[in-house]
Amino acid sequence: MYRCLGTTIEFLPFQIIRCQAAVAWEAKKPLSVEQIEVHPPKSHEVRIKILYTAVCHTDAYTLGGLDPEGIFPSILGHEGAGIVESVGEGVTNVKPGTPLNNISGDHVIPLYTPQCKECDFCKNPKTNLCQKIRATQGRGVMPDGTARFSCKGKTLYHFMGCSTFSEYTVVADISVCKINDKAPLDKVCLLGCGISTGYGAVINNCKVEKGSTVAVWGLGAVGLAVIMGAKAVGAKQIVAIDKHEDKFKRGK
């Protein structure tokens, strides 16, 4: 066994990892930190040692029972960053480290919107809403129809194909992005959702042009990312709107 994130990680036979995770047993109930089993990755799957994760409103929305696709029990979280621990057969886009030392493994960000580069949506320049694993991802399972998490003899479902509220997670190989190993993981984890949502809205959706005037409602993570994107494309004026005055300092 060895220590990880202040807790004991136990490697069991057949590469099952026992670690801690914040489990959502049911809607409208607090998360519960439990010891879980994370099963090894199968073909075209990647197991990641999660080092940092953020909390998105969507996580709270689902835990609150408002998401019609919410499935329980599950492991929430979709804004994370970590290191590849192991890979299944056929994975070529990322490389793992050793079982007891993941330093040499690729640094990655799990993606809730994958990119197979083969489906009609991936090939269409107007959208990136890959459909290859959408059906199974919506059911909280891996592409083969099964889950990689268990706790107390019960199956734990995946969330948005990421499940970053666990010390280890398993994702499809098309749902992982390799990043520079010098990038600070505590910051780039936000690229998994909030930053890319706001920045991408400016660049890809609204296609803001140089010299434009941009109004931003709300200065949370997404709103601040919109400001970053607007500044990057050369917006002439950026108008920030928020009822909390203390947020304007960050916006500036």
Image (tube, rainbow, N blue to C red):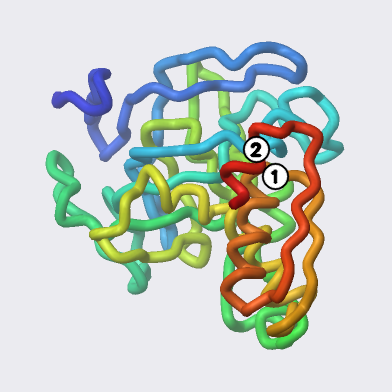
Question: Which residue occupies the foreground of this view, 225 or 11?
Answer: 225
**Dot placed on the residue nearer the N-terminal end, 1 or 2:** 1
Residue contact at pointers 1 and 2, CB within 8 angstroms: yes
The answer to which quarter of the image holds residue 91 is bottom left
Tell me the crowding category of disc 1: few under 14, some 14 to 19, or many 20 or more residues within 10 angstroms, Cα based.
Answer: many
Q: Is residue 23 left or right of residue 108?
A: right
Residue shown at 85%/30% (left/top)? 66
Q: Provide residue 238's location: percent of width, then percent of height.
A: 73, 63
**Closer to us: mark 1 or mark 2?**
2
**39 vs 203: above or below:** above
Element under disc 2 = helix
Q: Name the amino acid, label 1.
A: Leu
Alpha-carbon span between mark 1 and mark 2? 6 Å
Q: Provide residue 207's location: percent of width, then percent of height.
A: 75, 80
Question: Which residue occupies the foreground of this view, 41 or 214?
Answer: 214
Question: Which residue occupies the foreground of this view, 8 or 87?
Answer: 8
Q: Name the amino acid, label 2.
A: Lys
- Asked whether residue 191 is in view, the answer is yes
Element under disc 1 = loop
Q: Say which residue label 2 marks.
A: 247
Q: Is residue 60 left or right of residue 171?
A: right
**231 vs 33: above or below:** below
**230 vs 197: above or below:** below
Tell me the crowding category of disc 2: few under 14, some 14 to 19, or many 20 or more residues within 10 angstroms, Cα based.
Answer: some
Q: Say which residue label 1 marks.
A: 219
Q: Is residue 204 left or right of residue 84?
A: right
